[in-house]
């Protein structure tokens, strides 16, 4: 039972500390939409999405109004499009047609984003996988709500360096294709290692092939709540610090569990997972970097940052798993630069570099996220960054990702505005030494020795 004390405490977290449910994401399997004719595929895809998700947005709004819990986004994830269009799509134009259909369906049901314009190529690429990947720049330039992801490695399979090299080229091509919007297309494109099948957060959400026909996944967020709780125990020892984070994560996850169960019941769709990530926004007081500063750092990036982030991530997960039996997705702390005012401040102060962010990704939820880099950064350099991040994920048996934005026409120190939840970011310098010869090697980096557990 939830008592009146919990109710009052939750209301305070919502009113004063920026607690929200970041997203309700409906995962939809489109495997039954496969056909040899692309027009038939598009008809089936549109019909299935608009049927299953027709009440998703209204349900989210109703729950938000009735319980007083802000639900910021309503989203859809689908079966990786390379599988859905694999039989019918013979050219990149065919895949772009599918992307436009997905965008049309997303607009029809009113969701913010639709994820799953994706390919899973951790060991090798089919012809359909490669066609989809090569279609990404055009697909993201001609759609508004479609998000794309490509999984290029895993602990079990190693890293597909052919796919890494190609994704370096595609990130650069997507930046060029959307240069009139400050290369915004790259904000909707993420490259993964060990991508989870049930992540509700964009741009990396897709509906894994092991999932049910349709599911409801919920992502909660509460950096402001955690920061406020830590302010009350300022100067206390590590045991008190950890207990405070853990208890706060428990309360945040309870709110998400309530919303997930209600949405599942009302939509008649099974509940999947709660993702209890601390996902920041550009709003003041909604920052993961601010939490790190409250723990005792002058700025994110100062010595001790990786240790503080490891502590935060672990305690968030420990608190969350006590509140829900089905915790999944990414779950932990996100460290996107453009979406976190504290991270932006750290970059501007000279405390935070891409290299330090890479070190931090060893212990956080995901990876190099929403980082603006100079528009003249080479495709091979981007591929090298992707390879480094994938190696961290592969060896550490965790999800890592890269979402970098080479802003065409802009250089180090300039500012790029994305707007909304995507915020703004300073252009960060990238190591200028070449990795061309390394990235040009073909084949794949083998799986690490500890992957052999059968």
Image (cartoon, rainbow, N blue to C red):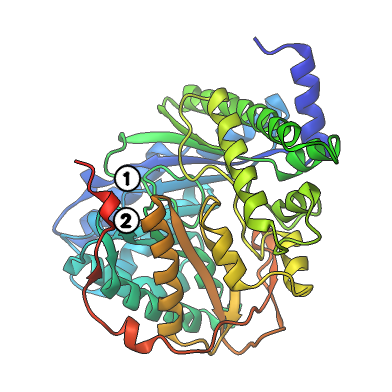
Evaluate if marks 2 and 1 touch, with contact meaning CB atoms under 8 Å apart. Answer: no
Q: From what the image shows, is residue 60 above or below residue 141?
A: above
Report if residue 116 is visible in the image.
no
Marking on residue 430: none
Query: As drawn, is 396 to the left or to the right of 224?
Result: left
Q: SS at mark 2?
A: strand
Residue 331 % position (x, y) = 53, 42
> Can you give x and y, in whole percent of width and height, for residue 46 in the image?
35, 50
Q: Quadrant of the N terminus?
A: top right
Instruction: Read off the residue under disc 2.
Output: 154
Residue under label 1: 208
Which residue sits at x=40%, y=44%? 50
Q: Residue at x 78, y 56 (%)?
A: 297
User: Viewer-proximal residue, 242 or 78?
Assistant: 242
For residue 335, above or below residue 386: above
Q: Nearer the viewer, residue 247 or 149?
A: 247
Report the Cα–Cα distance between label 2 and label 1.
Answer: 15 Å
Quadrant of the image containing the C terminus = top left
Depth-wise, is mark 2 or mark 1 nearer the camera? 2
From where the camera sits, is residue 179 visible? yes
Q: From the top left corner, tell me how far across and down residue 243 is, in percent.
A: 70, 30
Q: Position of residue 385 (x, y in %)?
A: 46, 74
Which of the marked residues, 2 or 1, is nearer the chain's N terminus? 2
Nearest the camera: 299 or 164? 299
Determine the secondary structure under disc 1.
loop
Q: Residues within 10 Å of mark 2 (few under 14, many from 20)?
A: many
Picture layout, residue 110 above or below residue 361 = above
């Amino acid at each position: 039972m939830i008592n009146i004390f919990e109710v009052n405490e939750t209301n305070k977290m919502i009113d004063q500390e920026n607690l929200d449910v970041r997203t309700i994401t409906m995962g939809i399997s489109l495997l039954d939409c496969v056909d040899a004719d692309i027009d038939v595929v598009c008809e089936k895809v549109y019909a299935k999405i608009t049927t299953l998700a027709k009440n998703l947005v209204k349900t989210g709004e109703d729950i938000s109004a009735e319980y007083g819990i802000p639900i910021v986004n309503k989203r859809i994830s689908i079966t990786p499009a390379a599988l859905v269009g694999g039989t019918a799509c013979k050219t990149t134009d065919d895949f772009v047609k599918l992307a436009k259909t997905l965008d049309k369906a997303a607009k029809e049901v009113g969701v913010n984003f639709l994820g799953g314009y994706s390919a899973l190529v951790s060991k090798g690429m089919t012809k359909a996988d490669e066609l989809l990947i090569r279609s990404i720049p055009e697909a993201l330039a001609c759609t508004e709500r479609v998000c794309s992801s490509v999984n290029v490695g895993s602990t079990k399979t190693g890293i597909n360096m052919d796919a890494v090299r190609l994704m370096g080229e595609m990130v650069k091509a997507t930046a060029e294709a959307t240069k009139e919007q400050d290369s915004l297309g790259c904000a909707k494109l993420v490259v993964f290692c060990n991508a989870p099948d049930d992540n509700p957060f964009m741009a990396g959400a897709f509906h894994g092939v092991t999932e049910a026909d349709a599911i409801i996944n919920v992502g909660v967020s509460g950096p402001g709540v955690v920061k406020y709780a830590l302010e009350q125990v300022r100067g206390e020892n590590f045991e008190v610090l950890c207990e405070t984070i853990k208890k706060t994560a428990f309360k945040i996850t309870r709110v998400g569990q309530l919303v997930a169960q209600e949405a599942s019941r009302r939509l008649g769709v099974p509940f999947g997972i709660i993702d209890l990530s601390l996902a920041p926004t550009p709003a003041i007081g909604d920052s993961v970097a601010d939490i790190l500063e409250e723990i005792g750092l002058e700025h994110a990036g100062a010595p001790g940052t990786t240790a503080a982030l490891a502590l935060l991530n672990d305690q968030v997960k420990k608190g969350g798993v006590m509140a829900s039996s089905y915790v999944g997705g990414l779950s932990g702390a996100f460290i996107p630069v453009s979406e976190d005012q504290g991270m932006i401040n750290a970059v501007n102060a000279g405390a935070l570099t891409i290299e330090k962010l890479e070190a931090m990704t060893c212990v956080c939820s995901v990876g190099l996220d929403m980082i603006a880099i100079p528009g003249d950064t080479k495709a091979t350099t981007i591929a090298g960054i992707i390879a480094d991040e994938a190696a961290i994920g592969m060896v550490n048996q965790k999800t890592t990702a890269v979402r970098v934005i080479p802003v065409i026409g802009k250089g180090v120190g300039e500012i790029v505005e994305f707007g909304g939840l995507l915020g703004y970011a300073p252009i960060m310098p990238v190591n200028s030494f070449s990795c061309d010869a390394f990235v040009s090697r073909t084949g794949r980096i083998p799986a690490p020795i500890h992957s052999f557990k059968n």
